[in-house]
Image (spheres, rainbow, N blue to C red):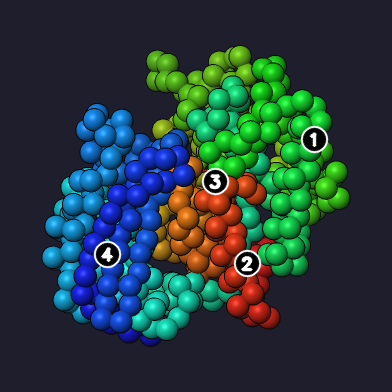
Amino acid sequence: MHQPVTLTRVTARELFDSRGFPTVEVELHSAEFKTSALVPSGASTGDGEALELRDHDPKRFLGKGVLKAVANVKEKIGPAILGKSWQRQSHLDDFLKEIDGTENKSNLGANAILGVSMAFARMQALQSKMPLSTSISKTFASLGRTLPVPMMNVLNGGKHADNGLAIQEFMIVPKGFKNFSDALRAGVETFQTLKKILSDRGLSIAVGDEGGFAPHLGLEGSHQSALILLTEAISRAGYKAGDQIGIAIDCAASEFCAKDKGHYLYNFEGASRTASEMIAVYENWRTHFPIVSIEDGLAEHDWDGWAEMTRDLGKKLQIVGDDIFVTNPKILQKGIDAKVGNSILIKLNQIGTVTETLETMRLAQKNGYTTVVSHRSGETEDAFIADLAVGTDSGQIKTGSASRTDRMAKYNQLLRIEESLGAQAIFSKS
Ligand code: 2PG
Ligand code: MG
């Protein structure tokens, strides 16, 4: 059981994310403790995401300042939540939603609200003398001992790089290991091996937003080249592609899709393709490469295409909805009813509170959808999602490559959690 929390001070400040853009940090105080939380920010955002409040003042940070969101925490949220006794995360989060009063949190800003919600989760954990992951597991009624399989984005494209690759993320998925640290080691070694292969071939080893490499692979069939490179890196690192390390892709297909006379067409490798043609491309890759998961293979509004892709590939692959579901329980329910996808990407700031995030995860798990807890391309040193992944037994986490501290902070936190769980730790089989 959680101890009730009474807040004595609520404040916020404008700090920076990994892209050097301003973001919100919220700080909460109780009589005994102080906690804080930093909010992440996406680039390839879904239309249905909760609103990230930016100042739009062209004189500061190209309009991307967050002083309004900071002021909302200090002047509107703080006075409304101070001094009361909060027994549950959901009590606080429901109240925050109520004072915002909009469907997409556009009044106070999802960045203001989420910062408070996350810092509160930390306060509740401290007050109840539990690690954050355990505290989340009490709220979620889960085991809270499952270390997730990492999905490591080692080759970047799309909006996260400028190398002409339409597909945004090529990930390695070290799943065939006995524990998280062995899996992570295999992922890190594969990343280092990939670096060597690229540099031996005179290709760029500069990294993109999520710490993966972003080489120019030439235009024709470049996606195929990326998949070949990954498979080669896995085996040269000494691992079995498929059994030990699989491949996952996040196509972020909304970014290369256009609607033409009511039809969705995908501008892919120099041709304009229908959803069925894209599905055929994925099916073909699947037969040649150890692909285990495809995220946002089609655009977020192409629901018919999604249903077709789920029918065709859903038994063989994990079909993850990110931009289409935006961590929103109502949209996920629509997806469940329409038999769209079999997995959901979970991003706290798409929906804007910890409680709603947990609600979406519960709905997914109850309906046999897998859950992948995820970072954003604009991240910070805050490793909340590591605890969230373990606390909910989510089974999978997507938090970037094996470089950049904004990404490694999450892996490091998972290693700490695994160590503290000791023999109690389980490594996910998903
Ligand atoms: C995604 C994410 C994270 P962004 O599409 O899954 O990798 O990117 O945060 O830019 O939406
Ligand atoms: Mg995505």
Q: Which residue is mark 2?
A: 415
Indicate the position of residue 206 as horizontal and vertical percent values: 63, 33
Q: Is residue 336 visible?
A: no
**Three-letter residue code for mark 1:** Ile
- Is label 3 or label 2 in front? 2
Residue lying at 24% horizontally and 30% vertically, measured from the top left: 59
- Is label 1 or label 4 in front? 1
- Is label 2 or label 4 in front? 2
Residue lying at 59% horizontally and 22% vertically, measured from the top left: 164
Q: Is residue 217 left or right of residue 273?
A: right
Q: Which residue is mark 4?
A: 93
Q: CA distance from mark 1 to mark 4?
A: 48 Å
- Callout 1 touching callout 2 (CB < 8 Å): no
Other-residue count near label 4 (Cα within 10 Å), few / some / many at <14 / 14–19 / ≥20: many
Q: Is residue 250 left or right of residue 55?
A: right
Residue 347 numbered mark, or none: none
Q: Which residue is mark 3?
A: 320
Q: Is residue 360 visible?
A: yes
Q: Locate residue 179: give its quadrant.
A: bottom right
Frontmost residue, 33 versus 305 = 33
Q: Secondary structure at mark 4?
A: helix
The first of marks 2 and 4 along the sequence is: 4
Q: Is mark 3 within 8 Å of ligand 2?
A: yes
